[in-house]
Amino acid sequence: MENFLIAKACDARVGMRPICVHMRALRAIAAIPIVIVLICGLAFAQQSVGEVTKVSGVATLEHAGRQSQVVEAMAVASGDTIRTTANGTVVVTFHDGSKAELGESSAFTIERYQLSGSQRIGALLKLWGGHLRTFVSALAGKPPEFEVHTPNSVAAVRGTDFDTAFVEGRPCPEDHTCMRYTTVGVTTGVVEVRNPGNPAPAVEVHEGYETTIPCESPPTSPAPLGVEELGAPGYH
Amino acid sequence: MMRRTLLLALLGMMPAVVASAAPYSDFFNAANPEQLGVTMFASAIAAQHKYVATHEGFELEQTLTPYVGLVGRVSGYQIYEGDGWDSPLAGHNSRPRNFGVLMAGLDLMPIQGTSFKMLGGSDVGDSDRARLEGDLSSWLWLHSRHPVNFSLTGDHFYNNGLSSGTVDLRTILDSSREMTWLIGAGGQLWDGPGEPHLIKEFGPDLGVLIRRWKIGIDLQAGYGNLGGYGTVAISRHFSWDE
């Protein structure tokens, strides 16, 4: 509209025409980045699968190769990676009502989050390290189609609330020689856990139980939540 | 010929020995990462009309290897009346006795969930003689619906020649993200100079671990040679990777 008015004004003052053409070109060039930002913003808004609903401490979000500090109400999209520092935690609420709570010194990527309106079609979160608690909104009569992967495990949700932790650089309680392991603890419902690097069948972990996946081994038989702590030095 | 056959047999057995030693091949390796743990604790026991004893302090544990830790414990005892099962001062009824206990030793953890502590040290204060302690705790069937913990402790007090022990058998009743509940039964027994026979008391116990805070609370009540008794114990665990 603004450009149109300028053009009209220039047409009225024929003697100034070359300057007006130049100005018009400048205006058009200046508008390009604005249009690009608007288009990108629109595209990002279309891709948004949820938003950050709680942040404490420092956390970063990597989107399309760019890093920015996480703030509340920030939109998240498939492909985004969120990292927390030693005192940072982040809660992401997806548009289907599911939540992911990332613990301290942790990182996860929203590999895929497909929505149809506010209904989830499928979701895959990848935990690179640290701790992720997931609340999965239930869809009546449909399988949840929600998975959390770590480098050595796949946890397929059959329920609604579970914790995943991927630990690297510490000996696994189940096998001191293994220095990378995943634990999956279930608070509500059932989660099916397997190690994609091992042909052993998946293990179903029910409410109140947890399993450990050491290195390339299959998941252990579920044990009650807390038994690792009770068996550790200091609780005997 | 016989010697040669024996040598060959020994050589043949070596791989098997090496293979069976594989699970402990890192026995002498430094733990990675090493961990410092601190457990603060307080407990009280009251036996009907006989005595009340309180015990509080902290225990430090530094891992050395994946299977061995160094343990040090500093604690205080107060015994308010009568002759206590854990009192090295049996026979003195005139006033509450206060004494500290300094102990140190090793914690062996041969398999996951099993710990055997051997401690030695001395009392200071109203009691000032040496004491020895051994603690065994083992979790059985860890990967089952209800793992079972068996624990046994034994002490010998050089101050009065008494020996005492505790025994406990518990299982996980229920567990959630916040808490783990344990139920079982146990008791204590002691004997030595001045005791007519082995004194025993046993009863059911209930425990809870508040997972977020790493706080354990245990209650026990029962009956024995001294009548009814009750115990309460609380502990808080902290740990740091090094």
Image (tube, rainbow, N blue to C red):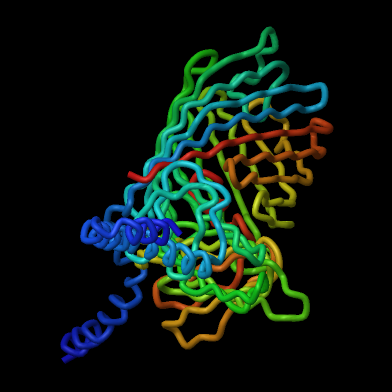
| Front residue of this view, candidates A108 and B41 | A108
Q: Is residue B10 above or below residue B194?
A: below
User: Left or right: B48 with respect to A164?
Assistant: right
Residue B145 location, quadrant: bottom right
Identify the residue shown where x is 20% and y is 90%: B5
Q: Residue at x 37, y 59 (%)?
A: A34
Q: Position of residue B93 (x, y in %)?
A: 70, 12
Residue ranking furthest to the top: B94
Quadrant housing the N terminus of chain B: bottom left
Query: Residue A64, image x and y in percent?
Result: 36, 66
Quarter assignment of residue B140: bottom right
Q: Can residue B225 be seen?
A: yes
- Look at 45% across and 41% down and name the residue there: A57
In the image, residue A234 above or below residue A138:
above
On screen, residue B205 versus residue B28, left or right, reads right
Instruction: Residue B108 in the image: state x and y as whole percent.
Output: 42, 51
